[in-house]
Image (tube, helix red, strand yellow):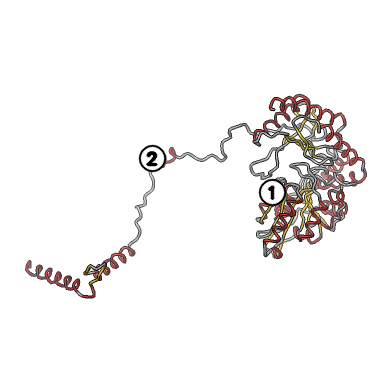
């Protein structure tokens, strides 16, 4: 048996040796003879095929014991839902009465410059009577979106009324002011389109720009030279620009600066470079122009030259909601389904419609504006008086337009830090409220707000303010600013 085994081994060795000595199994590398390379290659190929055929290793599965589960839970430290704050969050004063020219805070009556109640219509008897009648007829809410089962006749009445007032073919009513801007923009501008926007636009417009997923290019705030250069660069460098939808987005009166947009120059650039214009009239509707029809009337520009006009009804009309007005085609695009697959305007389609009593109040507010042109005269006079008085405030400068209902004050000398600037401005606003019962607001911005303009103190002027209110506010701001900023300098 042993002899047979030895013969087998010797035969095998002879075969292997012969195979290695074969000419086909030899190779010459750098002048050296190497034998058996064919055998080695075959062997390695067999090993590779064997390894590839094997299943990957998996540890045996077994359920965790209760002790192991408890240990893992004890070791786990969850991440906080929000980052920790190193300072107390800003808490604005709480109003205890209607936000009219005078309101109540902490049981004390104060002069209110923090509400955009431009025509002083909050608490107006005709508006209250209109709301009461609508409440008796329709109830409090609509309980449904406009596009499905939430359209009530008073909604259609308002849309017809605002179109007639502004001289446009049609309009559409939204349930919330902010949703008007960030629904209208994505309804028309999509991915791949181009939007040129002012760097000072407020957050609702910024949100609309983001939701559109369009290519957004900002130009310097209210700077027509910068707008012209931006439009020129886009049209000259983009070979496909003629095939893209292109928009210019601006505010009539900028909420973050109080500046008024030069609409006549914007229209000239629009026509030269073939862009469309979306204008937000939230802070100019019911304020600018001979009859309060907004920036188009103020600038002497026909409203047909604008493609889309939006506005928040929570300002001059003292109601709520917003509207978009323009051509019938523009309005229909926001109203209807497209190809039964895509919804054009999310705020219109998915939100419950405006409560009927607010639509009724807005119609009444327009009627009051038309019947009482002296409201506009009183507002313009109040703006002029306050602007003149506040131009002498030490350490602060007015950056708003002389006819803007928003009187905007900024620091003459910035600290170099927006956080420190805010602290100084908040200190002024707090002392003015506590010592002289004058309520003004600092332009706080969230982390989502990408506005690049400096922060400041905003005073919203109302036709309901008396000259005594204006003098009281200006004298208080002068005294407090001198004390706070004098020590700072």
Label 1 SS:
helix
Give 442 or 337, whichever is nearer the viewer.
Answer: 442
The answer to whether residue 385 is left or right of residue 92 is: right
Image spot of residue 395 (x, y percent) = 74, 30
Q: Which residue reaches farthest front?
A: 31
- Can you tell which mark lies on residue 123? none
The answer to whether residue 354 is left or right of residue 58 is: right
Q: Which residue is mark 2?
A: 67
Q: Which residue reaches farthest bottom?
A: 23
Q: Which residue is mark 1?
A: 206
Image spot of residue 170 (x, y percent) = 83, 57
Quadrant in which the N terminus appears: bottom left
Image spot of residue 278 (x, y percent) = 76, 54
Quadrant in which the C terminus appears: top right
Crowd band around label 1 with a 10 angstrom C-alpha radius: few (<14), some (14–19), many (20+): many
How many numbered circles does the render carry?
A: 2
Image height check: is 236 above or below 432?
A: below
Crowd band around label 2 with a 10 angstrom C-alpha radius: few (<14), some (14–19), many (20+): few
Tell me if residue 92 can be seen. yes
The answer to whether residue 140 is left or right of residue 55 is: right
C-alpha gap between disc 1 and disc 2: 52 Å
Q: Nearer the viewer, mark 1 or mark 2?
A: 1
- Residue drawn 31% across and 63% down? 51
Label 2 SS:
helix
């Amino acid at each position: 048996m042993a002899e047979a085994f030895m013969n087998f081994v010797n035969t095998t060795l002879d075969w292997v040796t012969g195979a290695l000595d074969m000419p086909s199994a030899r190779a010459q590398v750098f002048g050296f003879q190497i034998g058996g390379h064919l055998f080695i290659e075959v062997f390695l190929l067999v090993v590779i095929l064997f390894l590839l055929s094997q299943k990957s290793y998996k540890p045996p599965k077994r359920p965790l014991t209760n002790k192991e589960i408890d240990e893992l839970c004890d070791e786990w430290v969850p991440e906080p839902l929000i980052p920790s704050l190193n300072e107390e969050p800003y808490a604005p004063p709480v109003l205890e009465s209607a936000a009219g020219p005078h309101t109540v805070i902490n049981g004390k009556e104060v002069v209110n410059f923090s509400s955009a109640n431009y025509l002083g219509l909050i608490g107006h008897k005709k508006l209250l009577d209109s709301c009461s009648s609508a409440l008796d007829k329709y109830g409090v809410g609509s309980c449904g979106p406009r596009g499905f089962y939430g359209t009530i006749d008073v909604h259609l009445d308002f849309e017809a009324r605002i179109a007639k007032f502004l001289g446009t073919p049609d309009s559409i009513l939204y349930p919330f002011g902010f949703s008007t801007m960030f629904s209208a923009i994505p309804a028309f501008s999509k991915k791949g389109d181009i939007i040129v926007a002012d760097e000072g636009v407020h957050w609702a417009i910024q949100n609309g720009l983001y939701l559109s997923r369009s290519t957004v290019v900002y130009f310097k705030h209210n700077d027509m030279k910068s707008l012209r250069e931006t439009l020129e660069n886009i049209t000259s460098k983009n070979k496909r620009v003629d095939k893209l939808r292109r928009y210019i987005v601006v505010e009539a009166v900028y909420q973050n600066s109080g500046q008024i947009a030069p609409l006549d120059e914007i229209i000239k650039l629009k026509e030269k470079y073939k862009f469309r214009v979306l204008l937000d009239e939230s802070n100019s509707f019911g304020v600018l122009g001979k009859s309060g029809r907004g920036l188009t009337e103020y600038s002497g520009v026909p409203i047909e030259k604008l493609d889309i006009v939006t506005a928040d009804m929570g300002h001059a009309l003292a109601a709520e909601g917003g509207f978009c007005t323009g051509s019938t085609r523009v309005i229909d695009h926001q109203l209807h389904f497209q190809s039964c697959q895509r919804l054009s305007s999310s705020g219109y389609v998915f939100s419950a419609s405006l409560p009927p009593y607010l639509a009724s109040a807005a119609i009444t507010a327009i009627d009051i504006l038309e019947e009482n042109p002296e409201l506009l005269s009183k507002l313009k006079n109040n703006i002029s008086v306050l602007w003149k008085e506040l131009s002498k405030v030490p350490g602060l400068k007015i950056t708003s337009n002389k006819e803007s209902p928003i009187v905007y004050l900024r620091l003459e000398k910035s600290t170099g830090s927006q956080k420190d600037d805010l602290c100084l401005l908040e200190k002024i606003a707090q002392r003015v409220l506590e010592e002289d019962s004058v309520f003004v607001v600092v332009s706080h911005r969230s982390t989502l707000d990408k506005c690049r303009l400096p922060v400041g103190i905003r005073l919203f002027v109302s036709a309901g303010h008396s000259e005594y209110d204006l003098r009281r506010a200006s004298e208080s701001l002068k005294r407090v600013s001198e004390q706070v900023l004098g020590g700072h300098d």
